[in-house]
Image: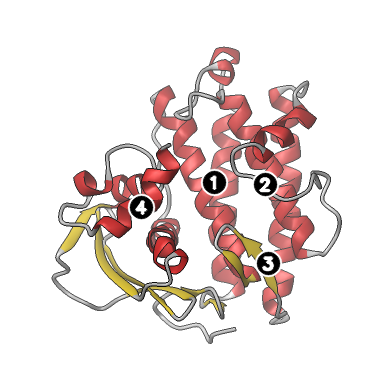
Amino acid sequence: MIQAGQSWSLSTEDGVTLTADELVTTLSLQHDRMIGCWQTLSEAQWSADSRNEAWTVHDTARHLADVLEVLTSQLVDEPSPFSVGEFNPNSTPDLWLSYSADDSPDATIERYAAAAVRHRECVGERMAAATPGTALTPYGPAHWTMSVVHGFWDAWLHERDIALPLGIPATSSPDEQRLVAIYALLMGVVPARMMELPFEAVVAFNGVLSVTVAAAHEAGQLTSAESGAVGSNLSGDLHEVVDSLSGRGASVQEALPGAPDLLEALAAFLRS
């Protein structure tokens, strides 16, 4: 594990530089906020379409509970309750949803809350013990903490998928925004790894929080880190840029004028 410093960084080989307390606290802020929001939703809101129109708000919440349970099973090396063969992003999440199709919103909140507590406990214990190991991510085997951050990024997006169509503010803490910007740009560099091309991008994410991030692919390794660079040629609103890099909202070129085509590659795939 890389030693923690003032700046945060991620690496497929070495994992995160956040301390156990920093990562667990960031996860806790996200988990508690979503639970608090869900507890206020009406029956009609639970049944409404999310930003992903294939799923309702309730479907999306059930998916987030599924993901926490799957990730925690990986952390403790136990069989997942959703062990259904090789993961297929186009079909596996819907198969997972079939297990909880009859659950009420209250049951979903209860399941998510229990999964969130266990997930944070496992993450904290493994980080405190500096436990080595890898986990399977969408871009191949990587340090196990990268799967945790991937789950965080996925949940940050799905929280917005729920909140925005309902007209609910999708707020998050500065540390959550730091981490999601760092990871979103790393995901944007994934096509360079797939094509075995060296590549680097530096982006200034602006908004309530302003953070400049440098992400790169080199010799099979993906890295992304807060950067002290000033005056990046690429800059845009943090929420809009993260959405666009993740296949939502405006195109990458619209949210991040001047962005190289390679940063649009994954986003275009996710929109298809």
Assign a secondary structure to mark 1.
helix
24 relative to 236, above or below: below
The answer to whether any part of residue 175 appears in the image is no
State which tag comes first along the sequence, 4 or 2.
Answer: 2
Asked if the residue under mark 2 is in contact with the one under mark 3, i.e. CB atoms within 8 Å, the reply is no
Q: On residue 67, which mark appears?
A: 2
Amino acid type, callout 3: Ala
Q: On residue 135, which mark appears?
A: 3
Which quarter of the rendered picture does the N terminus lie within?
bottom right
What's the distance in space between the residues labelled 3 and 2, CA to CA? 14 Å
Q: On residue 155, which mark appears?
A: 1
Q: Mark 4 Cα within 10 Å, few/some/many (few <14, many 20+)?
A: some
Amino acid type, callout 2: Val
State which tag comes first along the sequence, 3 or 2.
Answer: 2
Q: Residue at x 52, y 17 (%)?
A: 48
Q: Which one is nearer the viewer's eye here, 228 or 267?
A: 267
Asked if the residue under mark 2 is in contact with the one under mark 1, i.e. CB atoms within 8 Å, the reply is yes
Q: Mark 1 Cα within 10 Å, few/some/many (few <14, many 20+)?
A: many
Q: Residue furthest right?
A: 79
139 relative to 105, above or below: below
Q: Residue at x 73, y 36 (%)?
A: 96
Amino acid type, callout 1: Ala
